[in-house]
Image (cartoon, rainbow, N blue to C red):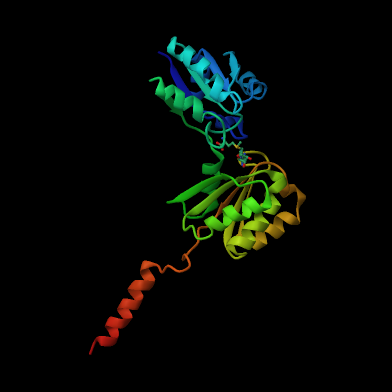
Amino acid sequence: IGTLYVVATPIGNLEDISARALRILNEVALIAAEDTRHSARLLQHFSIKTPLAACHEHNERDEGGRFIQRLLAGDSVALISDAGTPLISDPGYHLVRQARAACVRVVPVPGACALVAALCAAGLPSDRFIFEGFLPAKRTGRRSRLEQLRQEPRTLIFYEAPHRILDCLQDMASVFGGERVAVLGRELTKTFETLKGAPLAALEQWVAADANQQRGECVVVVAGCRAPEGEESVDDNARRVLKLLLAELP
Ligand code: SAM
């Protein structure tokens, strides 16, 4: 039985590919790629001649069987997406599921991932966080999703398309409040990499004033809600009990 490798590729800077990823992409019998034309350029850059086959969101469920057959016949397959880590807002989930169900060994080959790149440089709490992927494209859906997240205490991470970044920041400022701090990570690892942190209202204005900030790929990292409404933190409770006890002391 072959192995299914889930291989991360760069999110911009080609130097971010790992030595292990290069070796595996060279060694496998087949590379399953989200967009074969896009990945052909990456493979060409690294002089990798392994054949490519399409594995994208439209054929993944139906065509997965073809890859499983190859794996069961003894060929190893590497799954890659257009950029970063497969399955992270990218195809691959169905294939990995089918492979595991067929008792095929699935091996991760970690590397670049935009959400991790943004979080590790944002300077917001990183001990606990939630990844929300892409918000709904339409305003009503986006706002109602944000409403559900308003009191989330963990750091929030979102992917957003450049033509929606301004609308997205506007909605975040109005739902989370303009004072809530956020960091926009744009074109990470690339020439025009930007990491701008500011309260949401100021961040929105900054992006609105500069059309360049509305281009390229972006991640938005938002500070969690500090004291969820209607709930008191342990500190507040402890302080109140202490005050009562102190009043009773002689
Ligand atoms: N699988 C990828 C990963 O591991 O991050 C994400 C794929 S998703 C289809 C593409 C989105 O990821 C972009 O719209 C953007 O939100 C984010 N992204 C990808 N590359 C980025 C980069 N270099 N800088 C900022 N965001 C990036």
The residue located at (58%, 55%) in the rendering is 146
**In the orientation shown, which residue stands out farthest toward the top?**
73
**In the orientation shown, which residue stands out farthest toward the left?**
250
Q: Quadrant of residue 1?
A: top left
Locate residue 73, reporting x and y percent: 44, 9
Locate residue 30, reporting x and y percent: 54, 15
Quadrant of the drawing holding the C terminus: bottom left
The residue located at (27%, 81%) in the rendering is 245
Horizontal arrangement in the rendering, residue 178 relative to residue 238 (left or right): right
Q: Quadrant of residue 199?
A: bottom right
Asked if 226 appears above or below 188 in the picture, the reply is below
Locate residue 220, reporting x and y percent: 60, 50
Please count the marks in the image.
0
* Residue closest to the eye, 196 or 165: 165
Locate residue 72, reporting x and y percent: 43, 13
Asked if 100 appears above or below 158 in the picture, the reply is above
Q: Is residue 197 visible?
A: yes
* Residue closest to the eye, 124 or 61: 61
The residue located at (70%, 44%) in the rendering is 162
* Residue closest to the eye, 189 or 143: 143
Asked if 110 appears above or below 148 in the picture, the reply is above
Q: Quadrant of residue 246?
A: bottom left
- Taking the image as four quarters, which one is ligand 1 found in? top right
Q: Is residue 76 visible?
A: no
Horizontal arrangement in the rendering, residue 92 relative to residue 139 (left or right): left
The residue located at (25%, 86%) in the rendering is 248
